[in-house]
Image (cartoon, helix red, strand yellow):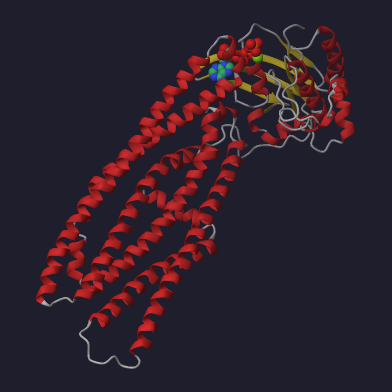
Amino acid sequence: MIQKLRLAFKLMWRHPLLMLAFLASAGARAGLIAAFFKLIQGFLKKALAPSTGAASEDFWLRLAAVAGLILLCWVGRSVADYYAKVLQAELGRRVEMGLRLELVEHLLKLSLGFFNRHSKAQILRAVNSDAASLRLLVHYTAGLVISSVQVGMLFGVAFTLDPVLTMWGLVGLPFAILPLMRIGSSIYKHAEESRFQGVTITHLLFQVLSGIRIVKVFQGEEREAKACHRSAMDLLKASMGVVKRQSMASVLLDSLSGFGIFFVIILGGIRVSAGDMNIPSFIIFIMALQVLLGSTRQILNLYGQIKIQSVAIDKIDIFLSEKPDIKDEKDAVALTAPPRTIEFQGVGYSFDSEPVIRNVNFTVKAGETIGIVGPSGVGKTTLLNLMARFYDPTEGKILLDGIDLKKIKVSDLMKQLAIVTQEPFLFQVSVMENIRYGRPDATDEEVIAAAKAANIHHDIASWPDGYETVIGPTRADVSVGQKQRINIARAILKNAPILLLDEATSALDSKTERQVQESLDKLMQKCTTLVVAHRL
Ligand SMILES: Nc1ncnc2c1ncn2[C@@H]1O[C@H](COP(=O)(O)OP(=O)(O)OP(=O)(O)O)[C@@H](O)[C@H]1O
Ligand SMILES: [Mg+2]
């Protein structure tokens, strides 16, 4: 808990001016509430004092002045309250935005291994709602500041009225601490389960949406709905667990506060009847105690809320502490020119200690092509993934001009590579931008030339929006073969010295394949190519 509060303050201090303004308005708000009570107390004392005879001339003037001051405090408190709330919200939103961007930048730097270990639903949850939890953490921590300052001020008001009575008034609170801490950990456990079920539902939805055709033909609608229903019920159970524990904590605190009020009534009554305390002071004391206990309950609520948000924040923390598996070593060397040789030396790779490829040896010289064929699941794509350094070999080495791939700067290696993946991929931007992704500074003419070489130009030209067609919003989809050709155009445009082709033409009819192959052959003459093909 302390850790979370420290984190919230650290994040809030990234915006020092906002933070100072917030603290000033929170302080002013609490100060004006305390002044309000003091003024009322002074007023009641005078007003209820036995009359001294004819009201002096300036009595009305003083009465108006006190009433005016009280009004000023009241209005001032509202203004301070407005600023405290707005600044509290702004602090939270700025922190959320900053963290979301930090998280996205961080995720983009992580290696493929991370994306294999975590589902899309988990990652989206972290970037969307978990980052929003941080805003709530800041919001609640700022609320905690407001309530704590208020508790401090009201404690001061009550204490100056009667220190002993104040202690009796708060007598129940220490007994609440231990049970509240236990309830707090239970809230965390239930919030964690509720988050897990939330991610499960998103994951199920992802699956259904991407496999909607399979769901329909294999009549899986009912099964999928049932799976969602089960998770939704578990989510309901877990979130009700949170709510019940929060209410339990409130009831506990309220009951224990009741003891304080009980003692105050008895002891205060005795004092008033003995003439040790006047009635106005007693009334003010009761009022201040009530607000004080109300603010204490508010602190408790915020404690519960912070516990709930802690679950998401711990998850973000796990993601942020992930380090890329593939990164530049300290003594990484630059790769300024295309390598003259690529050598696989006893290369092996295992996923989770399950060997996929073993002892692969070959050398390919600049401009040469090496074909990789073999049955499905034998490790062809894995071999290309190793070349692109998505993973590092678990055995042996890959050498570029005799230098271990691991010793070469990752960004330099990527500059040398172009890839057409086995499952072609398009971004939801225009076709022009999809192809230009291969070389962002390419002109429209260069993009069109690449599209012509990949034999996709005529298809694109026949679409109403041509190269401006956006896959998704303006055109639901394109055929797999068209996707493959756009992916090939992207690789052609990059014109990189090493080309990785993973069944790049598998979805094309033999005539189109032949045409695309001619362009690829021309490209391959200039490149060192690793090509996976279902037939050579
Ligand atoms: N992320 C992963 N985690 C665990 N195992 C994996 C992972 N990716 C691939 N594999 C396994 O590694 C093996 C090789 O997969 P790979 O994709 O390299 O095969 P492939 O030769 O390209 O097959 P295909 O011709 O069907 O594309 C398979 O048995 C596969 O199940
Ligand atoms: Mg494959």
State the image quarter where residue 526 is shown.
Answer: top right
Q: Is residue 336 left or right of residue 34?
A: right
Image coordinates of residue 313 in percent, x first then y, are 45, 42
Give how far across and how far down residue 222 sits, in percent.
49, 15
Q: Vertical placement of 495 versus 520: above or below? A: below
**Residue displayed at 19% across by 64% down:** 167
> Which of the four quarters of the rendered structure image does ligand 2 lie in?
top right
Q: Position of residue 43 (x, y in %)?
A: 30, 79
Tell me: 296 left or right of 504.
left
Q: Say left or right for 211 vs 309.
A: right
* Residue at the (42%, 22%) spot, across then down: 230
- x, y percent for residue 133: 47, 44
Image: 391 above or below 506 = below
Give the residue displayed 40% in from the left and 78% down from the top: 69
Residue 291 in which image quadrant: bottom left
* Residue plotted at (22% across, 90% down): 52
Q: Would you say residue 212 is visible in this rendering? A: yes
Nearest the viewer among 167 and 368 is 167
Which of the 4 image quadrants contains residue 261?
A: bottom left
